[in-house]
């Protein structure tokens, strides 16, 4: 299957630059996997679209202020550092811009010396491994110096950095938000629970590999970056019980979907575990756990639209995306949502 099979024309003005208020005011396109039927709704309609007993699986990761601006210690040349994955206590895999400016063993200074980073290793994919030194607690230093790592296609300033966090975010570690969850409000979650919908939390720290363009011409040649996940025993038990009773399991976002499928056995049950996943889901994949998905509208030719196409069918999803463009839906991180059932 070719990467170009997942291309579509997207006008730049449809890329959402800011989140709507309130969060659940975004539009919601409902796509029926069987019939291909499409409805145009609003996200706060979600309780009316789900059943008592449905399980919504959310990713409770929290975005860290991972974007740091510093300068080379010797030349004072400007260096941008994006924290991607924590390897050890003070050793991180990072994205450095401009990468060629920093040589092995050289040091970047942030915040007039509050934080220092030394280049330890250059990885084959161009990422850099940095070792940081500081006084005090790293998280406190990062809060003082770091900025939210908004995607490059968002060019407007974000006034409230909490709008790039879900309302249920708990454990810090992501370089990007699980954006399908940005539509939920505390009030909407309470309405869902009152309806009898279960909310189950799992964890996947989102890296940039999920969002990087596919450079291969053929899908099978693309390699995903690994991301850390954790599924607790309580979460596994809730999901397995729902599957055993024939209740629907619906992932909120592609990160939750990938985590569930990473820990699933062939019989559809999941196991409590933690580790690293590089699962790549594209058409032809047989889902073991998922019955539905809430997701945003994604990049052309991205691994995310490939995952969505695996669930609902490539032609059906591309038709839905073409309709979304005609109907002026808002795309990407701060954009509108799709519900596939």
Image (tube, grey):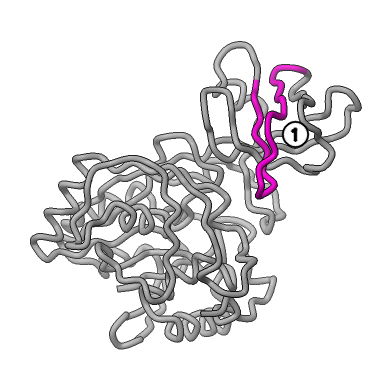
Of residues 200 and 290, the one nearer the viewer is 290
Residue 168 visible? The answer is no
For this orientation, the residue located farthest to the right is: 75
Magenta residue span: 113-132
Residue 100 relative to residue 8: left or right: right
Q: Residue at 34% across / 54% down in the picture?
A: 262
Of residues 97 and 124, the one nearer the viewer is 124
Residue 178 relative to residue 53: left or right: right
Dominant SS in magenta: strand
Residue 237 relative to residue 114: left or right: left
Q: Residue 102, relative to residue 111: is it above or below? A: below
- Residue 106: x percent and y percent? 79, 26
Of residues 92 and 316, the one nearer the viewer is 92
Residue 193 relative to residue 281: left or right: left
Q: Residue at 31% across / 65% down in the picture?
A: 46
Residue 118 lies in the magenta-colored region: yes
Picture quadrant where residue 203 is located: top left
Residue 207 lies in the magenta-colored region: no
For this orientation, the residue located farthest to the top is: 135
What number of labels is visible? 1
Picture quadrant where residue 300 is located: bottom right
Residue 279 visible? The answer is yes
Q: Residue 339, relative to residue 254: is it above or below? A: below
Q: Residue at 19% across / 41% down in the picture?
A: 234
Picture quadrant where residue 338 is located: bottom left
Q: Quadrant of the C terminus?
A: bottom left
Q: Residues within 10 Å of mark 1 (few under 14, many from 20)?
A: some
Residue matched to label 1: 69
Q: Secondary structure at mark 1?
A: strand
């Amino acid at each position: 299957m070719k990467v170009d099979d997942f291309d579509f024309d997207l006008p730049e003005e449809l890329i959402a630059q800011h989140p709507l208020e309130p969060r659940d005011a975004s539009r919601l396109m409902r796509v029926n996997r069987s019939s291909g039927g499409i409805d145009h709704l609003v996200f706060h309609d979600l309780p009316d679209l789900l059943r008592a007993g449905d399980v919504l699986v959310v990713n409770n990761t929290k975005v860290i202020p991972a974007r740091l601006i510093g300068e080379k210690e010797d030349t004072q040349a400007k260096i941008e550092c994006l924290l991607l994955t924590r390897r050890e206590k003070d050793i991180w895999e990072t994205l450095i811009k401009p990468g060629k400016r920093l040589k092995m063993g050289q040091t970047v200074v942030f915040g007039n010396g509050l934080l220092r980073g030394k280049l330890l290793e250059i990885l084959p994919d161009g990422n850099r491994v940095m070792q940081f030194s500081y006084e005090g607690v790293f998280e406190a230093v990062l809060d003082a110096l770091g900025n939210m790592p908004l995607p490059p296609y968002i060019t407007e300033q974000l006034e409230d950095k909490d709008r790039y966090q879900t309302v249920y975010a708990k454990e810090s570690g992501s370089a990007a938000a699980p954006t399908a969850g940005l539509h939920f409000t505390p009030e909407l979650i309470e309405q869902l629970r009152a309806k009898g919908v279960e909310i189950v939390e799992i964890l996947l720290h989102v890296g940039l590999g999920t969002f990087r363009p596919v450079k291969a011409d053929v899908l099978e040649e693309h390699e995903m970056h690994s991301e850390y996940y954790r599924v607790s025993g309580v979460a596994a038990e809730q999901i397995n019980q729902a599957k055993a009773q024939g209740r629907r399991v619906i992932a909120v976002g592609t990160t939750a979907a990938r985590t569930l499928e990473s820990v699933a056995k062939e019989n559809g049950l999941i196991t409590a575990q933690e580790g690293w996943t590089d699962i790549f889901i594209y058409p032809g994949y047989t889902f073991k756990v998922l019955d539905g998905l809430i997701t945003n509208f994604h990049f052309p030719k991205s691994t995310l639209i490939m995952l969505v196409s695996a669930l609902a069918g490539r032609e059906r999803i591309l038709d839905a995306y073409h309709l979304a463009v005609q109907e002026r839906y808002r795309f990407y991180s701060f954009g509108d949502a799709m519900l596939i059932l």
